[in-house]
Each structure stands twice: as structure tokens, then as C-alpha cells.
Image (tube, rainbow, N blue to C red):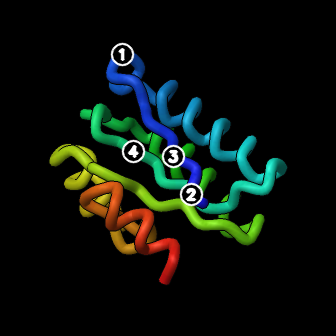
Amino acid sequence: MASRLSTSAAASPSAKAAWFCAKRCATCFPRGRKKILLNLADVNYIDSSGIGELVSAFTTAKNQGGELKLLNLTKKVHDLLQITKLYTVFDVKEDEAAGVKAFNT
């Protein structure tokens, strides 16, 4: 079963939201949750620290034998991942059903 994490719109403009999500992701693995679907629908901007936290969460997932997928990217976040070439690193899904299904293939 995939763990679903959503960000809050109030925290989204800063690295704090990405840091919070990365730390929440890290707490999933000791509990046996290795499939994480991170919903970024309310995130309009991620700074360099936030990108670093997302990469850290992705690396932690891989090192723990898990998976991290991103869901519902806003245009700005999508464009940022394209510019930084991270779009090819992260598995990005458009909707939750596609994200959940991707874990089962």
C-alpha cells in the first residue's frame, strides 16, 4: 500500500514544506511503508533548499528499498524540475490513480 503525503498550501512557498515532507517520508520507512506518493498540488514554488530536500527524500527511499513518486505538480514546479533536469529522476504522475497503479507494475 502506498503512503500518501500532502503538503499544506500555507507552508508551500518555502523550503520548510519540502523539509517537512522529506522528514515525513523518512519516518515512513521504519514503519514498513516503502511506497510514497507525494502530492505537490498546493506547492507553487520550491527554492534550492526545497529541491535538496526532495532529492534527499528520493535518495532515502531508494536506499531503503522504497519508491518516491511525485503527484499533481503545478506548472512552476514542473518547469523547475525540467530546468534542473530532475524531471527525469523523479517519477511524476498526473493523478492519484495513476500514481497508485504505477507502484503495482
Question: Badge 3 is on which residue?
Answer: 4
Question: Badge 4 is on which residue?
Answer: 39
Question: Badge 2 is on which residue?
Answer: 2
| Quadrant including the N terminus | bottom right
Q: Which amino acid does label 4 sit on?
A: Asn
Q: How far apart are marks 2 and 3 (CA)?
A: 6 Å
Q: Tell me the mark number nearer the camera, choosing from 4 and 1.
A: 4
Q: Tell me the mark number nearer the camera, choosing from 2 and 4.
A: 2
Q: What element carries label 3?
A: strand
Give the mark nearer the N terminus: 1 vs 2: 2
Q: What residue type is labelled 3?
A: Arg
Q: How far apart are marks 3 and 4 (CA)?
A: 7 Å
Asked whether the beta carbons under mark 3 and mark 4 sit within 8 Å of each other, the answer is yes
- Residue 28 percent location from the top left of the image: 71, 47
Q: Quadrant of residue 96?
A: bottom left
Q: Nearer the viewer, residue 14 or 39?
A: 39
